Image (cartoon, rainbow, N blue to C red):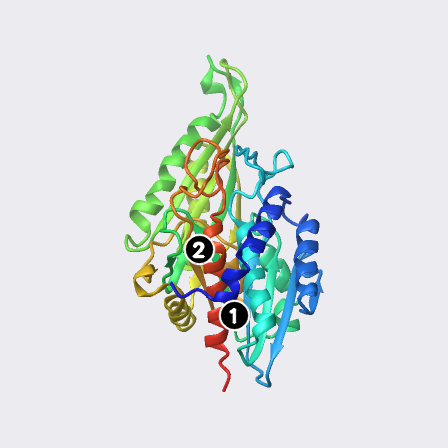
């Protein structure tokens, strides 16, 4: 590895920052203390700060030279509403809140790059440091965009990074095109006619209608969607009834749909509704169909991805860069930024959990797990990647 020496020298302080943030997790749009920490550090290092985009977002601005070129680097700040199982010193001090996705590490890595770039300024142009709130279900990226992120801070491209358990520590993974799926949810109410369970002919059984709909929906995936396209339709909840001898008036189907393209999502959305209405009508029932599109597919732009790969290789070497990483059906709201600007989102390997010291909870070190902890060995690696990306993307003439 060819890590940036001044960043390596700053690693201990980065670990302290990361662990402090981990111990004080804040949920989406509540990241007041975290944004205070970020803004205070940037200000201490002489970096101008703009606050308030996306409620609690922070944008740092580092300008150097005379070029009008500009890029954005994004890190998310929010935690998850879940209980931490770890008991080490930097475990969450707030019951029911935990940094179980590594956003504490993402924030610290970008701060590490900010510290280096503010002092060495071996680039020509502008770097916008985007510290984003509310990635975990709050669509903070979209909110920052709606608040004028790209108008107030015009940039040629935007980049994001997420730690990825299972990838070797200090390695990178990326792929051009779709890399993460869209996130969507549905809630469908089947309306029948209640009756005594011993007299089903006097009612319209919504439970049986719901079962027929649930089975029929799967043919969208197996028989209507192009088999070369990837999609998931998962019914995760079915609710109906309250007594063993009563046919209820309603049954509810709840679940999620994931796709890598908007076209496939459009097909599934439309056909789910058509099938639900058609099946219900066949049994003299009706449906209230609700389908909510949360995050779009995350699609990396080829040119910016190729550039990010070169920066990765400059830091960790070719053998530690996987340019054909397996896409995931998980979702990420950085997708909104990639819809608005060219850019790339990369994975940095978080290892297999061996970095966890005494006091970690039982179970694997996976994302959204009560035993998770960010691997501090990544801090100088991720910060070095950000630094090299800036210096290569905005070279001094």
Residue 163 at least partly seen: yes
Residue 161 appears left or right of 354: right
Residue in the foreground of this view, choosing between 342 and 130: 130
Q: Is residue 372 above or below residue 61?
A: above
For the N terminus, the image quarter is bottom left
Q: CA distance from mark 2 to mark 1?
A: 23 Å
Secondary structure beneath label 1: loop
| Front position among marks 2 and 1 | 1
Which residue is under mark 2?
266
Categorize mark 1 by other alpha carbons within 10 Å: few (<14), some (14-19), many (20+): some
Secondary structure beneath label 2: helix
Residue 25 percent across, percent down from the top left: 62, 44
Which residue is under mark 1?
341
Q: Is residue 247 above or below residue 58?
A: above
Q: Count the marks.
A: 2
Identify the mark at residue 123; answer none if there is no mark: none
Q: Quadrant of residue 70?
A: bottom right
Residue in the foreground of this view, choosing between 80 and 349: 349
Residue at (49%, 47%) from the top-left corner? Answer: 374
Residue 182 appears left or right of 45: left
Residue 207 percent across, percent down from the top left: 46, 27
Residue at (60%, 57%) from the top-left corner? Answer: 132
Categorize mark 2 by other alpha carbons within 10 Å: few (<14), some (14-19), many (20+): few
Residue 318 percent across, percent down from the top left: 31, 65
Residue at (66%, 72%) from the top-left corner? Answer: 152
Residue at (63%, 58%) from the top-left corner? Answer: 143
């Amino acid at each position: 590895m060819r890590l940036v020496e001044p960043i390596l020298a700053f690693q201990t302080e980065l670990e302290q920052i990361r662990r402090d943030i981990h111990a004080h997790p804040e949920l989406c749009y509540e990241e007041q203390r975290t944004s205070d920490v970020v803004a205070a550090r940037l200000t201490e290092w002489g970096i101008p700060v703009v606050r308030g985009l996306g409620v609690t977002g922070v944008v740092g601005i580092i300008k150097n030279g005379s070029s009008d070129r500009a890029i954005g680097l994004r890190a998310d700040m929010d935690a998850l509403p879940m209980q931490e199982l770890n008991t080490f010193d930097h475990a969450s001090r707030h019951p029911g809140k935990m940094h179980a996705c590594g956003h504490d590490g993402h924030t610290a890595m970008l701060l590490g790059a900010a510290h280096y770039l503010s002092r060495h300024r071996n680039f020509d142009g502008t770097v916008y440091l985007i510290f984003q709130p509310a990635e975990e279900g709050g669509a903070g990226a979209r909110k920052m965009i709606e608040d004028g992120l790209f108008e107030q801070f015009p940039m040629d491209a935007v980049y994001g990074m997420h730690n990825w358990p299972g990838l070797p520590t200090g390695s990178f993974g990326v792929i051009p095109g779709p890399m993460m799926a869209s996130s969507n949810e549905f809630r469908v109410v089947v309306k029948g006619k209640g009756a005594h369970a011993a007299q089903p002919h006097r009612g319209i059984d919504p439970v049986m209608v719901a079962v027929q709909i649930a089975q029929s929906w799967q043919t969208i995936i197996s028989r209507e969607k192009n088999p070369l396209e990837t999609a998931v339709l998962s019914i995760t909840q079915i609710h109906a009834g309250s007594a063993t001898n009563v046919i209820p008036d309603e049954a509810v189907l709840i679940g999620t749909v994931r796709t890598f393209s908007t076209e496939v999502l459009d097909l599934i959305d439309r056909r789910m509704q058509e099938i639900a209405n058609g099946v219900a009508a066949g049994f003299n029932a009706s449906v209230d169909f609700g389908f909510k599109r949360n995050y779009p597919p995350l699609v990396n732009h080829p040119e910016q991805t190729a550039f990010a790969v070169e920066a990765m290789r400059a830091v960790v070497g070719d053998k530690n860069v996987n340019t054909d990483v397996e896409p995931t059906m998980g979702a990420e709201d950085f997708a909104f930024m990639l819809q608005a600007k060219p850019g790339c989102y990369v994975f940095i390997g978080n290892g297999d959990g061996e970095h966890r010291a005494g006091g970690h909870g039982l179970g694997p070190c996976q994302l959204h797990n009560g035993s998770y902890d960010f691997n501090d060995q990544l801090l100088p690696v991720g910060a070095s990647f950000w630094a090299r990306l800036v210096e290569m993307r905005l070279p001094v003439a």
